[in-house]
Amino acid sequence: MLEKWPVHSRFTAIVLAATLLLGAISSGLLLARGKVSSHESQLAYNFVICVVFAYWLERDTRQTRVMRVWDRAWFFAIGWPVVVPYYLVKTRGTRGGLSVILAWVGVYAIAHIAAIMVRLAMPD
């Protein structure tokens, strides 16, 4: 899936996936322990995700020559759940776009399941 992407876009996608994975693992571990992360750490995580995601989108739109999103504040606050899947399907085709979306969902699911399994294996 990633081999069709340009190197800089591929690297940014890997950084984005790693950031999402680390966040999902830490959140899953906290969930398994019955705790929640602090407001500050949630704010920092959301900020990092937005910055990496914006960088990926900027690099990817240059390569795919799709019209760029200029009102990024509104886009990141409200529009991304609709626009990003549309963008992925438009630029990568139905199969490629859906595989990226499923990979993103899979990262969260696998990280949370793994964290819960680790918690169940840990002695109290």
Image (cartoon, rainbow, N blue to C red):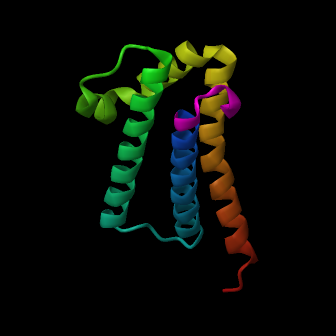
In depth, the one of 42 and 124 nearer the eye is 42
Q: Residue at x 60, y 68 (%)?
A: 32
Query: Quick check: 28 left or right of 96?
Result: left
Query: Quick check: 83 left or right of 124?
Result: left
Q: Main secondary structure of the magenta part?
A: helix
Count of residue discs: 0
Q: Quadrant of residue 118?
A: bottom right
Query: Considering only vertical position in the picture, is 38 above or below 76?
Result: below
Q: Residue at x 53, y 48 (%)?
A: 15
Q: Residue 106, position in %: x, y?
A: 66, 43
Give the quarter of the figure containing the N terminus: top right
In depth, the one of 58 and 39 nearer the eye is 58
Query: Considering only vertical position in the picture, is 111 above or below 61?
Result: below
In depth, the one of 16 and 10 nearer the eye is 10
Query: Quick check: 39 left or right of 121?
Result: left
Which segment did they paint magenta? Answer: 1-8
